[in-house]
Image (cartoon, rainbow, N blue to C red):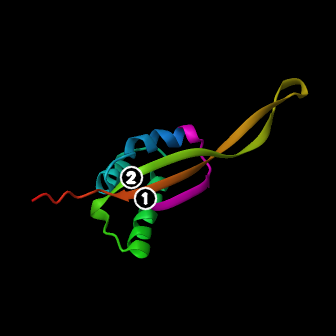
Amino acid sequence: MIKAELKNYRQSPRKVRFVADAIRGKKIKEAKDILSVITKRSALPLKKLLDSAIANAKHNFNIDSENLYIKELRVDSGITMHRMMPRARGSAFAIKKRSSHVLLVLDQKKVNNKK
């Protein structure tokens, strides 16, 4: 299992999960193709995270990326910054600026060698 993490990415987890759901369980080449055409903002950081995980596989474990697939792609909520927006008559409105933690786990497909 090859892991890569993206912590405190400044976009809400709900928006990042939309892109993550599109590539979960796919092969590496298919996931890269999907991320290159998705027009959401979180597609580029997820593509960079996928490239980082592939580099980890090659450098640390000497594994070729042809047999790899996305085993787990988890998007959790990170820190939430609380800000205030002034409103009428001296009141204030709370704004929550959310962030995400993304965990990507790659694994190898099992190859059956039946004779």
Query: Gap in Å between the C-alphas at discs 2 and 1?
Result: 9 Å
Residue 96 pos. (x, y %): 72, 38
Question: In this rendering, would 7 be left or right of 113?
Answer: right
Residue 96 visible? The answer is yes
Q: Which residue is mark 1?
A: 50
- Residue lying at the far left in this picture: please name it: 115
Residue 42 pos. (x, y %): 50, 48
Residue in the foreground of this view, choosing between 25 and 31: 25
Q: Marks 1 and 2: in contact by CB < 8 Å? A: yes
Question: In this rendering, would 65 be left or right of 92?
Answer: left
Residue 113 pos. (x, y %): 16, 60
Q: Indicate the amino acid at tag 2.
A: Ile
Q: Which residues are magenta?
A: 1-14
Q: SS of the residue at dot 1? A: helix
Residue 32 pos. (x, y %): 34, 54
Near mark 1 (Cα within 10 A), the count class, few <14, some 14-19 or many ≥20, is many
- Number of numbered discs overlaid on the protein picture: 2
Q: Is residue 41 above or below residue 58?
A: above
Q: Indicate the amino acid at tag 1.
A: Leu
Mark linked to residue 3: none
- Residue lying at the far top in this picture: please name it: 89
The quadrant of the rendering that contains the C terminus is bottom left
The quadrant of the rendering that contains the N terminus is bottom left
Q: Is residue 101 above or below residue 62?
A: above
- Residue lying at the far front in this picture: please name it: 115
Q: Is residue 11 above or below residue 1?
A: above
Compare marks 2 and 1 and give the one earlier in the sequence.
1
Q: Which residue is mark 2?
A: 70
Question: In the image, what residue occupies the spot 48% across and 61% down?
Answer: 3
Question: In this rendering, would 2 be left or right of 94?
Answer: left
